[in-house]
Amino acid sequence: MNIAIVGSTGNVGRKLIEVLEKKNFPVTEAFLVASSKSSGKKINFLGKEHIVENLEKFDFSKVKIAFFAAGSSVAERWVPIAAKKTIVIDNSKFFRKDPDIPLIVPEVNSEKLSNFKNKNIIANANCSVIPIVVALKPLHDLYDIKRIVASTYQSVSGAGKAGMDELISQTKEILENKKVVSKNFTKQIAFNAIPHIDSFLENGSTKEEQKNHDEIKKIMDSKIKVTSTCVRIPVLVSHSISVNVEFNKKYNLDEIKKVLSSAPGCKVIDEQKDGGYITPVDAENKFETFISRIRQDTSQDNTINMWIVSDNLLKGAALNAVEIAETLIKNDFYGK
């Protein structure tokens, strides 16, 4: 089929191209699209050189699916226009809270995919929410989750290429005893941790923390209580999440490990020895959501702790979008 990738020159856009190639997605013709600033650039895709087209001039009726990886401001303006002519899978946060637009993680709630017909738009979830729900949905089905306490440790690639460049440049400056200047983060990011992602809300949380709350409940179950703290750390790629999960039922730890080991999209690496767990570097360029440090919380009944790591540019964005498209194709575009 014909597809378009809007934002094809950005971090997520480039990962979309990579994932589509690796998964042998059934592409007849691909249109790489970006802003006027990036149009005219050349990108290799499926063994062919493509010239990036100008978003403002692109005709979306030429494609069956349009992947948007261009941020909220672009999505706000252009996704509704595109959706009049094609199915849109949007990676931005702009449409996630819309009750008429499905927020989809295929391993978790693909049964809601048919709701895309409301507006011809499917929203991709937040990059820290996706690994949480992939890991916790099988446990919710088993033991009925009551409460989730999540602490996320998010890589700088979540802030785009500029965030990655700043970490690299600041690291060099510190090692060379030069003065560090922060442009993209509120504090020095190199050799540091910043407990602040996105802007603050009146309740004291940040928008990133509110996203976790809202999206986990929308995707999994509105009855689950959710609270989180989101931290930016000096890692280039992959988000890590420490999760404390309280169930409404008694659990069996061996059963939890067994279920997660066979759950779609999950890979358990949990040995109680030096290095017997996953770190962000280990998860980079991997499709799986990795789960380690599964253990009893001895301070509270029916509660466990887990460590989850996932490549935020892949499963946290590009891969999940492609898997949404694959599910559409599998269900003959009706999301049955």
Image (cartoon, rainbow, N blue to C red):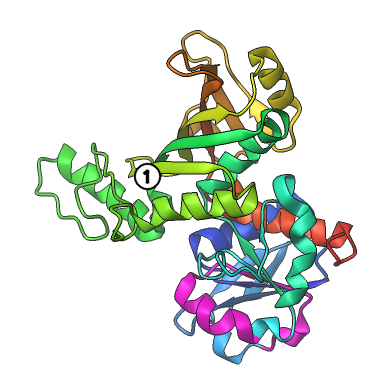
Q: Residues within 10 Å of mark 1 (few under 14, many from 20)?
A: many
**Residue occupying image coordinates x 9% and y 49%:** 179
**Residue occupying image coordinates x 46% and y 13%:** 298
**Residue occupying image coordinates x 69% and y 27%:** 260
Above or below for 214 versus 50:
above
Q: Is residue 54 visible?
A: no
322 sits to left or right of 211: right
Q: Position of residue 294 (x, y in %)?
A: 55, 19
Amino acid type at circle 1 is Cys
Q: Which residue is mark 1?
A: 230
Q: Position of residue 287 (x, y in %)?
A: 65, 41
Place residue 199 in its image quadrant.
bottom left
Q: Is residue 176 visible?
A: yes
Q: Write the start and end of the magenta stretch as one range.
A: 59-81
140 sits to left or right of 238: right
Q: Nearer the viewer, residue 147 or 169?
A: 147
Quadrant placement of the C terminus: bottom right
Q: Specify whether residue 289 is painted magenta.
A: no
110 sits to left or right of 127: right
Q: Nearer the viewer, residue 209 or 29?
A: 209
Place residue 30 in its image quadrant.
bottom right
Above or below for 239 versus 27:
above
Q: How many marks overall?
A: 1
175 sits to left or right of 109: left
- Asked which secondary structure carries label 1, the reply is strand
Q: Position of residue 318 (x, y in %)?
A: 61, 56
Quadrant placement of the N terminus: bottom right
Residue at the top extreme of this rendering? 273
